[in-house]
Image: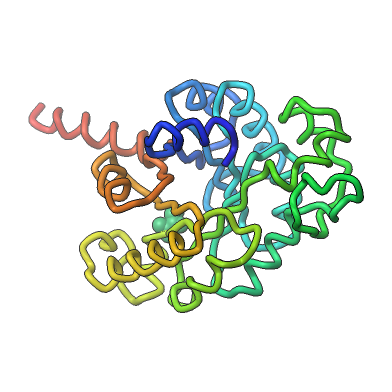
Amino acid sequence: LPKIMKEAKKAGKPVLGSWLMFPGASLARMVAQMEYDFILVDCEHGDIADAEMHVSVGAIASNGASPFVRIAAPENYFVKRALDAGAHGILCPMISTVEQAKAVVSYSKFPAMKGHENNGTLSGVRGTGSPFAPAVFGQSQGDYTATANKNTFIAVQIETVEGLENCEEIAKVEGVDMLFIGPNDLASSMGYPPLDNGKIPEVQEAVKRILAATKAAGKYAGMFCLSAEEVRWRFEQGFDLMNLAGDVAALAWWNANELEKLKDL
Ligand code: 3PY
């Protein structure tokens, strides 16, 4: 875990984050100054282009939170751009097989470097050269390259029936630090309306199976949450890391709630 998140975990607290679907340094800075451990820049479903992702990652890191990027798909290009921007961690959606998980790990790790065995045992295909990631980490380029394999956090999303069926093996993949459940897509993949996921016993059984597989492999377990109640429920269930909704939900729900109060006028 990145340092700020390790501190939360050590204190026995949930690792808490927020989720950004809008671009902009001002927004990223404001949310990063709240009490969250990490802020995730959502490049899968968010309205955030590559250059905007770079801006958000830098603004988050400079304001006390760990920047995470959810990449658009498990592809080398997206992994490279997020890590090169200085993300402390990536969240990779739609991981359904061991092969996909291994590929994402490989894209995330520099080739093993002689004399730098402390950079972990993993060797991948990540290219060196970004000046931005070292700047975000406050390191020289050499130091960044020599430590990034250990310092960057790789989370994969389990959110398909195929991913569920393979979750025990995916959890064991070396270099996968966290399994993060996307409950909406998981429900959708199982043939249910996504937003009903919390009420569907079959989906909740699947959640328990993924959580058990993650813990058995000694990895961190993450869960997408849309409210404080959900965060509490999942933390008590044994999840380590949760997001408390995000920018779009906050904007939409605050407006809906306040407008409702004026309906009688
Ligand atoms: C899900 O719930 O499926 C997610 O991936 C969160 O956006």
The answer to whether 231 is drawn above or below residue 264 in the figure is below
The answer to whether 4 is drawn above or below residue 161 in the figure is above
Could you say which is closer to the camera, residue 107 or residue 150? 150
Using residue 165 as the reference point, say whether residue 173 is left or right of it. Answer: right
Residue 30: x %, y % from top left: 50, 22
Residue 93: x %, y % from top left: 55, 60
Q: Quadrant of residue 150?
A: top right
Question: At 34% from the left edge and 70% from the top edge, which residue is drawn?
Answer: 206
Could you say which is closer to the camera, residue 97 or residue 85? 97
Quadrant location, the C terminus: top left
Q: Quadrant of residue 211?
A: bottom left
Using residue 228 as the reference point, say whether residue 61 is left or right of it. Answer: right
Question: At 47% from the left edge and 40% from the top edge, which residue is drawn?
Answer: 19
Quadrant location, the N terminus: top right
Q: Pick out the residue farthest to the right.
A: 114
Residue 20: x %, y % from top left: 50, 39
The answer to whether 94 is drawn above or below residue 41 in the figure is below
Q: Quadrant of residue 183?
A: bottom left
The answer to whether 51 is drawn above or below residue 205 in the figure is above
Question: At 40% from the left edge and 51% from the top edge, which residue is drawn?
Answer: 224
Quadrant for ligand 1?
Answer: bottom left
Could you say which is closer to the camera, residue 217 or residue 70? 217
Q: Pick out the residue farthest to the left.
A: 264
